[in-house]
Image (tube, helix red, strand yellow):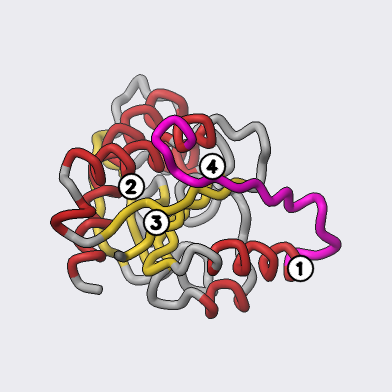
Amino acid sequence: MKNIVILISGGGSNMAAIVRAAQQQEWARRLDARVAAVISNKADAQGLVFAREHGIATAVLNHKDFDSREAFDAALAQQIDSHEPALVVLAGFMRILTPGFVNHFAGRLLNIHPSLLPAFPGLHTHQRAIEAGCKFAGATVHQVTAELDVGPILDQAVVPVLPEDTPQTLAARVLTQEHIIYPRAVAHFLRHL
């Protein structure tokens, strides 16, 4: 069985979309894959409730309990490794990962970013797209590399930027597309493992 470990920091809507897709598309039978665990760096992350309600193992590892980013990432990698993951999925995990962590999971670490990479890596993507006068925005699923938001692109979705858009309205429109492309990209990736 190909175990998937999903990392979250908040509501976990992309994680929930992946879990639902795994159930509806019968990943266990068709892809020999399952979401084995959801891990958060925040104990109050609402996504943990969803995961528990769906019978998925959960864990919390508070980054504030560690003296350094490296110490946290080492402990996180150990926690993830306990589930023998074929794939590690970042779904709103709001931590920049150390090169050592990224290298440990090289080739099996995915992320989704709310822009059409390579445009607007980092934070405040929707505000930056609006300020730049973009006619289109979107989301990108990519493999994670040591350099922020530049790994190989696996899937993208495009949405229009409307004249009346705010960062919030644009973010909501992009998020609906994230919930489509992230499960699709994960399933496609699993088929080729």
Q: Which of marks 2 and 3 is nearer the N terminus?
A: 3
Looking at the image, residue 111 lies above or below residue 51: below
Q: Where is residue 105 in the image (x, y as percent from the top left)?
A: 48, 74
Q: How far apart are marks 2 and 1 (CA)?
A: 31 Å
Q: Nearer the viewer, mark 2 or mark 3?
A: 2
Whether residue 135 is visible here, answered yes or no, is no
Q: Name the residue under label 4.
A: 124
| Start-end of magenta stretch | 52-69
Q: In the displayed structure, does residue 165 sit left or right of residue 44?
A: left
Residue shown at 55% from the left, 30% from the top: 46
Query: Which amino acid does the dot numbered 3 rest on?
Result: Ala
The residue type indicated by label 1 comes to Ala
Q: Quadrant of the N terminus?
A: bottom left
- State the CA–CA distance, disc 1 to disc 3: 31 Å
Q: Which amino acid does label 4 sit on?
A: His
**Which residue lies at the image location 25% right of the left edge and 53% below the top edge?**
156
Q: Depth check: 19 or 82 in front? A: 82
User: Upstream in the sequence, badge 4 or badge 3?
Assistant: 3
Give the mark, 4 or 2, whose residue is nearer the N terminus.
Answer: 4
Disc number lying in front (4 or 2): 2
Q: Name the residue under label 3.
A: 119
Q: Name the residue under label 1.
A: 71
Give above or below for 48 relative to 142. above
User: For mark 2, does the 10 Å Cα neighbourhood hold few (<14), some (14 to 19), or many (20 or more) residues?
Assistant: many
